[in-house]
Each structure stands twice: as structure tokens, then as C-alpha cells.
Image (cartoon, rainbow, N blue to C red):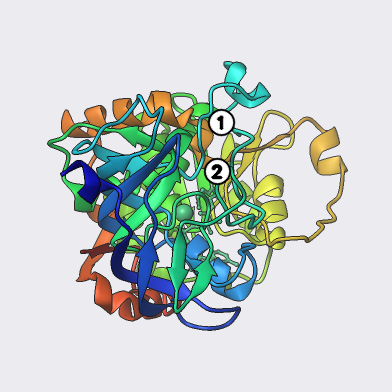
Amino acid sequence: MFLLFFQVIKCKAAVLWGLKQPYSIEEVEVAPPKAYEVRIKILATGICRTDNNATTGAMPAKFPVIGGHEATGIVESIGEGVTTVKPGDKVIPLVVPQCGICSACKSPNSNYCEKIDVTGRGVLSDGTSRFTCKGKPVYHFMNTSTFSEYTVVEESSVVKIDAAAPPEKVCLFGCAFSTGYGAAINTGKVTPGSICAVFGLGGVGLSIIIGCKAAGASRIIGVDINPRKFERAKAVGATECINPKDYTKPISEVLKEMTDNSVGYTFEAIGHHHTMVEALASCHMNYGTSVVVGDPPASSMLTYDPMLVFTGRTWKGCIFGGWKTKNDLPKLVADYMAKKFDLDHLITHVLPFNKIKDGFDMLNKGESIRTVLTF
Ligand code: COD
Ligand code: ZN
């Protein structure tokens, strides 16, 4: 039994061989975990826009790569020295690790652990990958690579959750829900009675709406160019939804008119420069706060009128909703189990893993919020 834990595992994974190519299901070899590493059997994994951004180059990755980062799994085996999880534990892999020793982890006010991989390093701490396919190394994605029946992560990139948590739901705590909900609660610090506007009504935007509602916002205005997103946005708490394509004037002007110039908080969950600036311009010129949640395109610069900030607006950003992942995710899952949140409106499709292409097609056609793939 002990030996079995330390064998190479052959399994199915979705490999991206290069830019502008589709994820291709291949048989890969997954090496055993080294010291301070954990091998996980993935049970369910969501498809996030960031997984698609890896195919376009907007999110850096080292090719070939196994994508995926929003998942639930069971620990299959652990390397030497691992103490925080054990085989059989139900876990969530962590896009934002919590190493506990870097400057961000040591501060109570930050979560951007230095072990994060948003630059496409694609390897674990010893500089190597645990995946091979057709005799070639295949690289890791955002420390997680969950589009695989088995993956290996560092101990800092995995946390144990309630064994009873439903995997095909709580995988959303691995990205969309935590990112959006935390952006409203931790970063925006939305206040009761305030007016909020959320730009982008995908899985992240809907989770921001859930956070704004939980914080007691009186109006939550959803903004999206795809009106098919409005119904679910309203189901999770948006009080109104508007489509910029229905107006000739900038949406910041529309929002000012709709609210007697009193939008307190805006959130950008699209990842485009022009919508980041428009969201900034949409909050009140003096007391407004705007939060950048969408991942900006890699290696790009943005110009904006500094008067927008000079007059008093606060422009903030956060990654993964500001949560300290190892500390906070088990508590968020416990709140879900206590029925504090409902994730059902966020999950539009559940498909077997081998239908991954259909999941990406629906994302790109704007037909889905979250597609969850199960193994
Ligand atoms: N104006 C208004 N809405 C727009 C526009 C526009 N110009 N362009 C696109 N949209 C809408 C789309 O119609 C869509 O409904 C929505 O924006 C985006 O939704 P999705 O489903 O494509 O994307 P999500 O919800 O998966 O969001 C992902 C982000 C784009 C926010 C991505 O940048 C992200 O995940 N950022 C979080 C950063 C982070 O903390 N990451 C941790 C792991 S990813
Ligand atoms: Zn994501």
C-alpha cells in the first residue's frame, strides 16, 4: 500500500500545447510528490476565463501546460514533511498559496504570497514539473493544474476543507466565488445602504454581487454587453442591469444619472483597460471606491486621467478577493455548508471532463457562467 502511493500515475489531462490551440485530452504521467508536495485526485474543476486567457496569451503560461485552477479533490499521497493535509482529506488547490513566511503572508493586511505563479513559471519550487506527456515535460499552471485526474501541488497551495462539502459546488471557492465575494467584502469594504455597480457578469461578477448584497448595499447595478447575463445577475442580487451597447454616452454618465451621482463602489470583473477606467470614472468623484478584479492583459500599460483619482476616488485592486487562502477558505466552505451562500446560480453546466471543449465553447459564446467538469 505504501509503495502504491509513490508510483507514477498515468491519467487523463487537458494539455495546451501552445498559444491559440485548444485544450487537448491526453494521457499524462504524474510523478509522485517530492518533499513538501501533495498529489491530489481531482474530483471537480470549474472553467474560468483565466484558463481561456492562457490560450490567448493574456495570462502567461509555459507550454505545454495543463490548465485549470478552480477545483476540489482528495489527497492521494503526500511527500516528506507535509503536515497540514493527509491522504483522504478533501481539499481545494490554491491559486494564491499561503507559504506563511513571505512578507505578504506575515502581514495581516495582505494575501499576495510570493509563491504565487502569475508569470508562467510553470514549475514547482525545485524548478521542475511533475507532469510528462509523450516523453516531454508538461508545465504547471498557477500552481494548480486541475484539468487533470491527478495533480501535484506544493503544500502551501492546498487546504483541507469539510469532508462533507459537495465537490462540484465548492470547487468555486478555488476561484470565482472567493475572488468576487472577497473583492466586495474585504477590498471594497462595501457599506450598508450604499450603491454599487459591477462591470462584467461572469462567475466573478456574480460573486461580487453576492458580496455587495451580503454587505447590505441598497442598489446593485450590473453592467454587461451580453444581456443574457442579466437574469442570473438579478437572481443573485442585482437590482438593475444595463447594457453599454444600449447607450451612446459613456456608461459612467449613465450611472451618474441613474443614481443622482451617488455610486459608492464599482468593481471591474472583465479584465479590459477601458472598462477599468470607466468603472473608476463611475464611482463618486470624491468618496467613491473602484476595485480592479479583472486580470489585466499580460505586459500591458494603461493611461488614464489622473484627475479621476486626484479628486478623491480610491482605486484599489485585489487578487483572489484578498483572502489568506489557507486560513480563510475552510471558513468560507463552512459558511457555505451553513447555507450562508448559494452557489447554484453560478453553475450553469456540469459536464464530464472529456467534454471540456464544449465548456470552453460555451464560455466563449457567452452561454455559460461556470461550467464544472467532473471526473
Ligand atoms: N463591457 C461590459 N461587459 C463586458 C465587456 C465590456 N466591454 N466585455 C466583456 N464583458 C462581459 C462578458 O460578456 C462576460 O459576461 C463578463 O464580462 C466576463 O465574464 P467571464 O465569464 O468571461 O469571466 P469570469 O467571471 O470568469 O471572470 C474572470 C475575470 C475576467 C474577472 C478574470 O480576470 C479573473 O478571474 N480575475 C480575477 C483575478 C484573480 O483574482 N484571479 C484569481 C484566479 S483567476
Ligand atoms: Zn480563475
Nearer to us in this view, 263 or 164:
164
Residue at 59% of width from left, 71% of height from top? 63
Residue 57 location, quadrant? bottom right
Residue 263 seen in the current view: no
Residue sitting at the far front: 3
Q: Does 169 sit left or right of 183 as displayed?
A: left
Q: Residues within 10 Å of mark 2 (few under 14, many from 20)?
A: few
Where 83 sits versus 18, above or below?
above
Nearer to us in this view, 78 or 207:
78
Q: Earlier in the sequence, mark 1 or mark 2?
A: 1
At which x and y percent is residue 94? Answer: 43, 42
Residue at 53% of width from left, 78% of height from top? 17
Nearer to us in this view, 125 or 6:
6
Asked which secondary structure carries label 2, the reply is: helix
For label 2, the residue is 259
Residue sitting at the far left: 164
At which x and y percent is residue 152? Answer: 40, 50
Residue at 34% of width from left, 47% of height from top? 39
Residue at 73% of width from left, 37% of height from top? 285
Where 28 sits versus 37, above or below?
below
